[in-house]
Amino acid sequence: MPQNETIQDLGLDEYKYDFVTETEPVFRAEKGLSEEVVRQISAHKEEPEWMLEYRLKALDVYNSKPMPKWGGDLSSLEAVLDEIYFYVRPQDQMERSWDDVPDEIKNTFEKLGIPEAERKILAGVGAQYESEMVYHSLREEWAAQGVIFDSIEDGLKNHPELFREHFGTIIPMHDNKFAAMNAAVWSGGSFVYIPKGVSLDTPLQAYFRVNQERMGQFERTLIIIDEGAQAHYIEGCTAPVYTTESFHSGVIEIVVKKNARFRYTTIQNWSNNMYNLVTQRSMVHENATMEWLDGNLGSKLTMKYPSCYLIGEGAHGEIMSIAYSGDGQHQDTGGKVVHVAPHTTSSITSKSISKGTGRSTYRGLCKVHKGARHARSNVECDALLINDTSRTDTYPYIEIEENDASVGHEASVSKIGEEQLFYLASRGIAKDEAMAMIVRGFIEPIAKQLPLEYAVELNRLIEMEMEGSVG
Amino acid sequence: MEGVTSALNPAAVERIGMSEPEWLRERRAHAWDVYERTPMPTIRLEEWRYTNLKKKLDLDSLQLSDAEAMSDDASTWPERLRAAMDEDRAASGHIVIIDGHVVHADVDKQLAAQGVILESLQEAITNHEELVRDHLATDAVPAEEGKFAALNAALWSDGIFLYVPKGVQLELPVRVTCWLSEAGTAYFSRVLIVAEAQSQVSYVDEVLSDDFESQTYTSTAVELIARDGARVQYVAVQRLGRGTFYQSIQRTLAQRDSKLDTLNVALGASVTRVDLNARLLGPGANSDMLGLYFGDDDQHFDFNTSQDHVAEHTSSDLLYKGALDGASRAAFRGIIRVLPGAQGTDAYQTNRNLLLSPESRADSLPNLEIEADDVKCSHGATVGQLDDEAKFYLMSRGLSLIQAERLVVLGFLGEVLAKLPLGGVVDKVTRVIEQKLAQHG
């Protein structure tokens, strides 16, 4: 079968998450950000007084901070934010059984393949629709061992001490303008606790869906991996394509305690009208390992730099990043590793593909603080340019305050070589297919780390995008 | 000049330009205007992230030099200046600058007959007014370049003009030796080199001083223009004493098939700040950009480089390497920009740092901005310590630890010098590094 037909059969010639579900929210705050909206969010969640105060304080911080002047083009963002609904409550309560989720919402997630995924081998599944988690479930066997996998709201309600001990400590509200915004209006997200020594052998998975037009989603996730524990958390994000812009600003806080191991995988496939400004940070303790696997395929503009603060001796941080920027997209992504303790190690591997008028920017930091003796870090960035209108940038910051550190950074930019295409053509491989093959080879070192269904999805996307890219 | 204030102010701009042609006085006044309008850079600016001018430079405390020009009699010149000149006399021409005044200029008679011009900028304004007017602070380093380019364009007292006519090739380098002696003084000078089509020239600039008790500031604006097929090598060796803030703002304009290479060697001064912008303007243009620094005590180095690929099929290759001892610190910020349409670009950028003591520090920021797709670009940066294996190997051959360390450092830095082996420079720089290394241990 000719390849083009195959692609059409798969329905991949368009953004496949572009469908809208007719749902009537039970509550929707006025558009724009105000104290009133913040109070409404807090009231709907029946929060303790301290959280309302925290939110209001964060709103002040947000208002006092200027828009960032670096990164992507945020010049029209303020106008966009005035038109956005910061809080949309899709239903009154979160369901534990898939059968109880309202049909319309269920249909949405069925189309995204969630129950199917759950039927496979996941340890737990969560789903957020607009501003709230609509569904959360965790396998019995893990619940019995003390694992907590819940909405962030239930985390606050049911585990107030654990929550308060960590919430806002890894990413304080003053960290940046959008962290402050999230602290003011956060809603939804996961609360995860893996007890000492417990190893989850399958991943926890969370789905984030924005359905309504002009919607702002502000999930907040807090993950605590206790000593010696192991887990893998996957998040996926999609939204329909609207002509107006939407906005997503998450804050993800992670603690990986002594000897623990944790991987956080993101497959961001927001529609191309989404501003995606996310703060993700982990504190990595003694001999613990933190891995970020960050895939950014969608959105209009993403600014996201997952970070590892290596605060315990022997801690290890790893960031693997794939970015794809098509027409009109700007992926401003990368990673930060901050070495604070001795004998800490880290690596960042970034691969980006820019096509059409797409722009991929790697922005990263490798910092070795005084006292982080014998730190080792390696950063590698490779960029592939498909067209003469594509753009790529690399901005790695390297700041070293210890002389026995060993730090290296390498970056390269290239286009697909005529010789490579010629060689494959001589083997009877069509140009589109050859392009896709080369791109797949380019991202393979990171793609192979992805869960299987995402790796398949990524490969399909590349085939689809490479079609007709040879000019 | 008795009774005349020598602070950095509009009166000084007028006084310096007093006997100059109208166009130049206007340029100075305009430059002062730009200077006043431009805010002082702070560490909030990416370009100044690693050098806090509030702490490092006090312009208000500085005076302009009011020294009389010394005579063109070598026996009256400072001992160290003469020693530096004697180390490598062979040259196509010499310039000697003492405290901002060009006190000596000579150029090979045959070359002069072929139209080569090597003279002080002040003389060139009289003798070659049109050439100077066309190029001085216009295309390469105009006042608009920034706060310090403007300050220099307003207050420069003298400098060097080198003009090489079409097809003329200089076998030996032009040698410039510069000496500063007044503490608390601000010096402003310029270098303007125009190499016409198919010409060839090397230029070696060495600046020296003793240590200063109070801060002394020297600012140079370097404008290098290589026309089609010209080959230009520019070398700046900075051996200033402690207490000096050395600033050099350099721009190279490389036309079609030209080769315009630079080497910045920074060994002295308390603060070194070099801004180097290489512009590749014609197809086939190429620039090698080399840098070498060795710091000890509390020396501070800040290199801010950019490689602008404007035309198709241009190439550039940057290599900056440094060793840092004591509590010295280096920052490197470099950017490769490939502009839309600059297809067929090859651009490379490497910064390597060797930290020799626990108190030393290095920051590196190698950037890429690529807006064309048919390019080969890469950059790399490393920060590390001496290679244990290399040391061990040398010690197994009977060298002491200190000897082995010195040899490894020399080998590390020697890579840069080997790429631009101009007569005299390699030996001279190696000697100074050896002297510095002798204090390490």
Image (cartoon, rainbow, N blue to C red):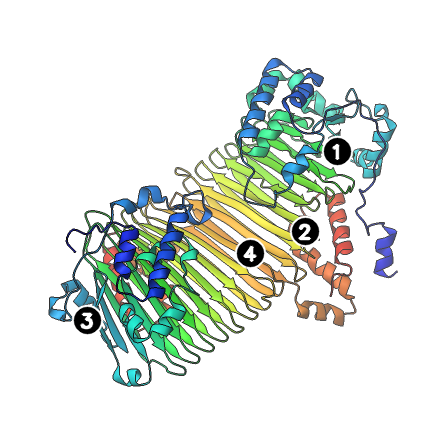
* Residue identifier under label 4: B369
Query: Which kind of residue does numbered mark 4 sit on?
Result: Glu
Q: Quadrant of residue A7?
A: bottom right
Query: Which kind of residue does numbered mark 3 sit on?
Result: Asp
Q: Distance of mark 3 from mark 4, alpha carbons?
A: 45 Å
Q: Are marks 3 and 2 on the same chain?
A: no
Q: Are marks 2 and 4 on the same chain?
A: no
Q: Are marks 4 and 1 on the same chain?
A: no
Q: Tag 2: Cα neighbours inside 10 Å, few (<14), some, or many (≥20)?
A: many
Residue in the foreground of this view, choosing between B222 and B173? B222
The mark found on residue A122 in the picture is 1
Query: Which kind of residue does numbered mark 1 sit on?
Result: Leu
A150 lies left or right of B45: right
Q: Secondary structure at mark 3?
A: helix
A283 lies left or right of B151: right
Question: Which of the chains bears the disc numbered 3?
Answer: B
Q: Distance of mark 2 from mark 4, alpha carbons?
A: 15 Å
- Return the x and y of residue B8 as percentages of the image width and height: 28, 50
* Residue identifier under label 2: A325
Q: Distance of mark 4 from mark 1, alpha carbons?
A: 42 Å
**Residue at 58 percent of width and 32 percent of height:** A179
Query: Which kind of residue does numbered mark 2 sit on?
Result: Ser
* Residue identifier under label 3: B86
- Return the x and y of residue B9 as percentages of the image width and height: 29, 50
Q: Quadrant of residue A144?
A: top right
Residue in the foreground of this view, choosing between A59 and A101? A59
- Return the x and y of residue B413 as percentages of the image width and height: 35, 61
- Return the x and y of residue B392 as percentages of the image width and height: 35, 55
**Residue at 53 percent of width and 39 percent of height:** A316
Question: Which of the chains bears the disc numbered 4?
Answer: B
Q: Is residue A3 above or below residue A451?
A: below
